[in-house]
Amino acid sequence: MENKNFKNQYIQLAINFSDLVRTTLGPKGMNKLVLGKNPVMTNDGATIIKSINADDPISLMFKNLAKNQEQAVGDGTTSTTILAGQFLSQALELLNKGMHRVTIINGFNLARNAALYKLNELAIEEDKKKIVLTTFGSKIPKDFSEKLANLIEGVDTKNLKMHQLENEDPSETEIIKGFAFEGFTVNDRMPKEAEGKIAVLDLTTNMENAKMAVQTSEELVKVNQQFRKFKKDIVNKLKENQVKVLFYSDTNPELESLLTQADIMAVVTYDRVKLDSICKTTGANAIADPESDYSQFVGYGKVRYLEGKKTIIVENENSPVSTLILRGQTKELLDETHRAVDDVIGVLKNMGEGKKNKIVGAGAVEVQLSLFLKEYAKQIVGKEQAAVEKYAEALESIPLILAQNCGLDAMDILSKLKSAHVSGLITLGVDDVKGISCAKERGVLEPLKLKTHAISSATDVANLILKLDDVYKGVEEGNE
Ligand code: ADP
Ligand code: MG
């Protein structure tokens, strides 16, 4: 008996962990948390899980589960975590009734396979714009989401960057061929706009390596001086190559004044990622050695400095990088839009277009799967039948929790949904206003891949935790 309690404690720990993110599921769950004390941390389940300070094996397993879902599909971490907890919660009931965990694991595997089969059958085709609008959901005003969806429709979101401009008219939000970032020219007298050859001088590697090698501050001063020695040569080489704009990663007053005299527009950034985006946009290659031949490294583009906005815009019509210049009145509004576009990029990245690779969200697909599995269970002869039924019940937790988080009478919504689905209305889901509505019509869709991955890995983790108990039991028996 002692051993059984010990096992249950482990499973209970996992259920408790999964319960932590319960209230963040769905559009309403998120909104509630955005108003909290620490908006950034509590914005979504993934962030919460990441920031939980726990290193026991169960917490680590859940952290990995979330990380894995995030990396593989970019979304769905909350659903995955909840599902794993619910599977275990159902397994616990079966264990308490005396079922062997191997039977439960076998039953769960049968259920998983059947669910994945049914998921593919339920997949539908839907266009990119609709997905974008769904992902924006209620986070962004309707006409602005329409505008953003139109803009995003035409670009490769894998190479889409974003830049925010405050105190501007949102209707002037645009996508440019190129890159924009917070920055300024190093001297006021430099040109504010230039078109032509562009050089990127990345001295951070040189400096970092050198700095790592030095031990004393005197030596560090020497390293810095070494670079300064090159300054005249640098500017001469830039002039020889007719470079109009220089992006570089060090500050040096003398170099600044030489560049100003040479009428070269110069911008400093230490950020590797930014330098990389500038290179991609302009076709330049970063020059790491100031003494090398610059001609093979230069790129081309048009650079503008928006002084009042502390913004540098680099454009090139052949740029593989595009940037969404988000305009809006306040920072808060822009941040919110930024997050929503990030979600869109994540979702699109994991979803091809045109094919049957979307499923109806808002709990609709889970109700379908649950009903299917309950029918399927009837065909199973053996103890696994009960495990498949319990697995089916666990899936119902998604619509149930969604309804709870919308402040609805969740049990009532769930039973209404189930009877509607039995009568063939298979796209009905949870609606925060109406209680129940056609989620497909509302455009609440999710990538098939997200759901497949969520169900599969939640099952794996639940089974793993059930097996973990097996190991502990074995050890104890061995000690007897
Ligand atoms: P996850 O980390 O699992 O993606 P979310 O907080 O994003 O968690 O919630 C996703 C769930 O919310 C999915 O089941 C999805 O279908 C549902 N959902 C998204 N938008 C809506 C909506 N407008 N109405 C009802 N349910 C929605
Ligand atoms: Mg989500």
Image (tube, rainbow, N blue to C red):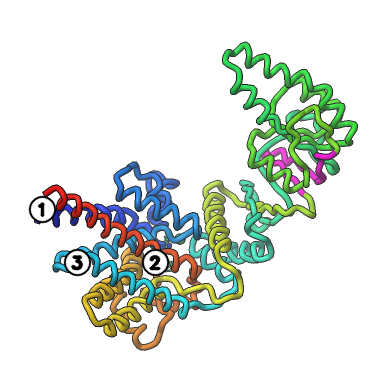
- Report which residue position mark 1 lands on: 2
Q: Is residue 142 left or right of residue 95?
A: right
Which residue lies at the image location 87% right of the left edge and 27% below the top edge?
Answer: 236
Instruction: Examine the rendering and report whether any part of residue 167 can be seen.
Output: no
Q: Tell me if residue 271 comes above or below residue 352 in the rendering.
A: above
Which residue lies at the image location 83% right of the left edge and 22% below the top edge?
Answer: 232
Q: Is residue 479 left or right of residue 63?
A: left
- Report which residue position mark 3 lands on: 100
Q: Is residue 37 left or right of residue 297?
A: left
Residue extent of the magenta highlight: 296-315
Residue 247 image offset from top left, x and y in percent = 74, 35
Of label 3 and label 2, which has the lower sequence position? 3
Q: Amino acid at mark 2?
A: Ile
Of label 1 and label 2, which has the lower sequence position? 1
Q: Amino acid at mark 1?
A: Glu
Of label 1 and label 3, which has the lower sequence position? 1
Nearer to the camera, 105 or 318? 105
- Mark 3 falls on what kind of element? loop
Is residue 313 part of the magenta span, yes or no? yes
- Report which residue position mark 2 lands on: 455
